[in-house]
Every structure is written in C-alpha cells, then in structure tokens.
Image (cartoon, helix red, strand yellow):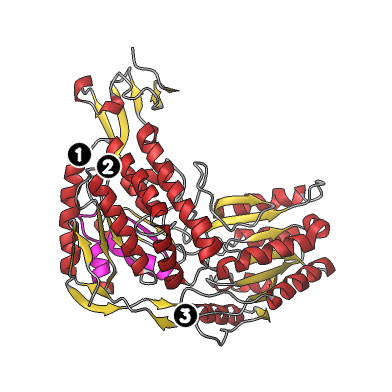
Amino acid sequence: MLEPVLIDGAWRAATSEGSFSAINPATGERLPATFPVSGIADVEAALDAGVQAALELRDTQPEAIADFLDAFGEGLLTNRDALVASAAEETGLPAEPRLNTVELPRTADQLHQVAAAVRNRSWVMATIDTGAGIRSMFRPLGKPVAVFGPNNFPFAFNSVSGGDFAAAIAAGNPVIAKAHSSHPMTTKLLTEIAHSCATVTGLPRAMVQLIYRLRHLDGASFAGDPKLGAIGFTGGRRGGLSLKGPADAAGIPIYLEMSSVNPVFVLPGALHARGDEIADEFFGSCTLGAGQFCTNPGLVIIPTGHEGDAFVDAAAKLFAEATPGVLLGSPDHISDAVATLVGAGAKVLVGGSPVERDGFAFANTLLTAQAEAFFGDPESLQTEAFGPVSLIIRADTIEEMTSIAAALDGNLTGAIYSASDGSDDAGYSAVEPELRPRVGRLLNDKMPTGVAVSPAMNHGGPFPSTGHPGFTAVGVPAAIHRFAALHSYDNVPDARLPLELRDRNPNGVMERNVDLRWTTDDIA
C-alpha cells in the first residue's frame, strides 16, 4: 500500500504514476514503506490549495506564524526518538552524535530563531521617508513556495523543517514540500508534526503540503507554474538547472544551492609553521560525514617543494588509514567525478574506487595535479565529487596560486591559511582579491565544513554554487527575504498602511529606518 500525500489539509491517496522505496545505505536493503510518484493532478491540487492558503494568510497575524514555528521546533524534540530512528535508517548517518545531538537540536534552534525574528518584525525592513510620504517593507509573496530538500541533511535542510521551509513560512507563505527520495519516511514524520502544529496554531489547512516524488516532466511543469511564488532548492547542479529553466521562463524566483569544491589555499609560511596540523584539519573536514557536505574542501592548493611533499604525504597517510564512511546512495557519481579528474591530468594517490561491502561506500580518495594541468583544463579539475574526495593542486609560486584563484568557478566557500608572523601577508594580499568575488564565505585559517546558524552567515555564492549570488540559505533576515516581496506605499494615509509602516511602532521593539535612521521610536 502506498503512503499518502498531504494536500489541502488531508492525507490522501496520490494520483500515482509509479512508486518507490527508500534504501538503507548502510546495508543496501530496500525499506518496507512504499511511496507514490505523484501525477500532475497532485501538483495542480496542491497549487490550488496553496493559493487559497496564501489568501487566508492575509488576515493572519505574525504572532500566529511565530507560534507555529516555535511549536514545530518543540515538536521535533518531543518526537526525537522516532525522527532519529527513521533518519538513521534512511540515510545511514549515525544516530549519535550526528542526528540526535547535533542536527536535530540545530534544526529546532533554527526554527526558534526564525520565530523570534517573526515576532520582532524587524526582518520586514520597514523604511519610512516622512518628507516624500513614501514607505516600504517586505511582505508575503501571496502565493505558495515550493521547497526541494537535499539528501545529506534529513532535518536541517529538509523540505519540511529546514532553512528554506522556515524562511518561506516566516515570510508568510504556505509551503509545498517535495521530499527527497532518500528519506521519504523521515519527511512524512516531519510533515505530520508540522501539520498538527499548523492546525493547533490556527494556520490555513494547506499551510504545509507534501509530495514525495514527481516524474521529470511533471517536476518541470511544477517549477514553471505561475501559481508558485518562488522555489527553494538544495541539491545537485543537474537537478537544480532542470528546474531553473522552466522557472525562469515563467518569471518565478528560484533559489538554488547546487555544487561547490570550496577551494583552500595554504600559503608557504602557514605550511612551514603548521603543515601537519593543517593536513589533519583538512583530512577531518574532507571525510566528515563521508564527505557529503556542500562545504567539503574538494580542492586544496599547496606550494611545491619538500614541505608541500610532506603535507601531501601526511594527508595521504590519514586518508589511507581511515575507514570509509557510509554514503547516502550509490557511489557511481563519485566514480564518474574521479574519472573526470584523472582524465584531466590528476593522479590518484589514495583510494579512487568504491568499497566492496554491504551498503554504499567509496574509498577515502586523494588526488594531485600540477598547476600547469589545472590551467590546461580548469573546468574538469573543478569537478565536484560529492564524497570523501579531494584534489591537491601543487603551485610553484604565489603568482600561480593567484592565477588559480582567478580561474575558479563560483563557490560557497573559500579559505586561505597564512602564517601568524606576517610572512604570508604579501601572498594573502595577492590571492585574496581574486578569491573573494568567487566565494560566498571567505575563511581564514579554518576549514569550511559546517554552517553556523548566524545572522551574519552567507550560505550562498556565485554561480554555479547557487543560482543567485545575492542571497543566502542560512541567516536571518537575509534568508527570509528570498521569499518576500518589497511593497512600497506612496501618499497612503496612516490608517490604510500595514501596521509596521504606521506612525506608531506596533510592538515597540521593531527596528525601522525612519528618514535614514534606524530606530524603534514612534513617528511624532
């Protein structure tokens, strides 16, 4: 029997075009629950219900949305045993500490942070020009938002609980979630909690809807439907671009987090002072979670010479001795990526092939190539291998490092390691200006793995790491603004304005830009 979809507030049978089951990646066994591949009728029904929910939200106070987000955050912790057990079975990720102690509390905290922002209301960026009589603020899109979640974070980036979901809800939009096929039962459990919390807090019955899988043509039709207000997507480049085409054609904003090799530059002074220490940090970062992090350091630039050789040897030893982790799915895509790297001139030092055992695994893999090879085929040597794989590029000079930085595609992150005694200052000054515009987040003396839930975080970057360099998937209020529209009011009387733009500050704590000065004061 197929699991039901959630459409317009009711769990119901899908208009099925097929079925699928998740696989336990640790054992390779197919799990018993069977889920539908929805037909276009499900998409149309969800869109119609979402449009109606958006209309109902016009009369919903921010406090009700904040109450929902807080209740949902608490609901995650209340149901943590069932959620963690399901996620561990569907992803192969360890229950402790990864899922139970780290990711689930992080997800709940993220929901609470967003709830606090909704209550405060400062995220709307109320801007008031009393002289011109013009006022503006961010408001809901007035349409549902579609959220496509990835496979590697079953809670923190899930289509029902993750950052895109929380941001879209905070902006006052209903969400149509498209589950990832790797963890459909976990997503169903999350949706049950979310739907229950939405009902208790008085939100529209179609505030949260769930579809598990779509055929490619139906997915493209969904992405290009004018009833959608926006799309949030986290996943591979191929999948993201398949949605971007129809969305762009229909004028639907689509925010994509896709692929990134997250380059790390180790300057000569840093290599001399603490090469072994950096090699250990690099190994830990690259193999954490079997390398299945979007901020995994997949490209490391190291000077040539005996100290560079020592770094490579130390890293290779660590990669070779460690037991490969469980992958989320088949390692075929990693094999293809490694083959592309080798074909472009890289040499495999360690690993390079799948591990023969129950479930899915790929050997911890380290490759190396000379800067000359990189300049000959920079596109191929920036191929992302989403797993425990990294390529070390050997550069003879700072000038070569700078040229490598200048040839990089857009990335989520980039890091530079430099000496504390000032010996790398000139090198840093040469490399940083080329690296800075090619990454969303620049790190110094720190590996990129991990994304803090901070207002200052940029989890975004230039194409092809994302589809738009001006927005972030993590960090309030910027993440919320992706799913909001800027509304301006010209010569509108005070009584007709939204509460946030009236002369009286509606809650006394919301920051407003009044005549170029941020203040919580009422307007005299």
Mark 2 Cα within 10 Å, few/some/many (few <14, many 20+)? many
Say which quadrant the N terminus sits in: bottom left
Q: Residues within 10 Å of mark 3 (few under 14, many from 20)?
A: some
Residue 440, image x, y percentages: 53, 52
For mark 1, does the 10 Å Cα neighbourhood hold few (<14), some (14 to 19), or many (20 or more) residues? few
Disc 3 marks which residue? 330
Q: Comparing marks 2 and 3, which lies closer to the viewer?
A: 3
Q: Quadrant of residue 369?
A: bottom right
- What residue type is disc 2 on? Pro
x, y percent for residue 192: 29, 58
Q: Residue at x 42, y 72 (%)?
A: 90
Residue 227 on the magenta span: yes
Using the rendered view, name the quadrant where residue 45 is placed. bottom left
Q: Which residue is mark 1?
A: 58
For discs 1 and 2, the disc positioned in front in the rendered view: 1
Q: Which residue is mark 2?
A: 140
Q: Earlier in the sequence, mark 1 or mark 2?
A: 1
Q: Mark 2 and mark 1 in contact (Cβ < 8 Å)?
A: yes
Three-letter code, disc 1: Arg
Indicate which disc, 2 or 3, sits on the residue closer to the N terminus: 2
What's the residue type where badge 3 is placed? Ser
Is residue 273 left or right of 94 when viewed as pictured? right
| Residue 345 in the image, given as x and y percentages of width and height | 64, 79
Q: CA distance from mark 2 to mark 3?
A: 40 Å
How far across and how far down the image is residue 362, in percent?
A: 57, 79
Residues marked 1 and 3 touching at CB (< 8 Å): no
> What are the residue bounds of the magenta stretch?
218-247
